[in-house]
Amino acid sequence: AGTRTLADGRCSRRSRREATMPMSKEEHDEACTVYAALALYDGAADITADSIKALINATGNEVEGYWPVLFARYLDGKIEDLIFNVSAGGGGGGGGGDAPAAGDGGGGEAAAEEKKEEEEEEEIDM
């Protein structure tokens, strides 16, 4: 990590992460806005563009004006769904092994035969 001179002439030592993996302005703005919205939610405060902007400014950060508006509109009424249903998105893998393949006319017989074998195995296990 190196040192850099700030606008007021003081030196600031950069962290290792900052020296090796700088965050772009857009990434910084998005992260600040996300953290502000989560902090407001955690504090049971209203998540509005003004409250997000006020919290960001209170932490000494600055973001482009559209970020608080964008997040406030997006999160309106659905932040809890986004927080608590993280894994609800996307389709799962597997499942549905009984459906016959396209063009497979004898799929029903194979499924019935497989089910019969499973029932026999269950009887043996008991």
Image: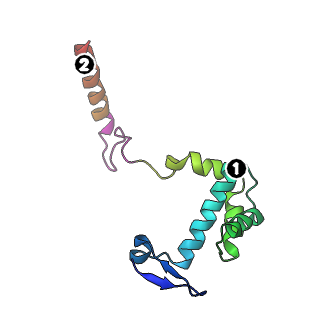
Assign a secondary structure to mark 1: loop
Number of numbered discs overlaid on the protein picture: 2
Establish if 117 lies above or below 77.
Answer: above
Q: Residue at x 33, y 35 (%)?
A: 108
Residue reaching furthest top? 126
**Image point (60%, 72%), residue name:** 29
Mark 1 sits on what residue? 43
Indicate which disc residue 120 carries. 2
Question: Mark 2: which amino acid?
Answer: Glu
Tell me the kind of residue under disc 1: Gly
Q: How is the image coloured?
A: rainbow
What percent of the width, then of the height, locates residue 63? 65, 75
Callout 2: SS: helix
Residue 19 located left or right of residue 81: left
Which residue is at 24% across, 24% downward? 117
Q: Position of residue 79 (x, y in %)?
A: 65, 52
Nearer the observer: mark 1 or 2; the answer is 1
Question: In percent of the image, x 60 and y 67: which residue is there?
Answer: 32
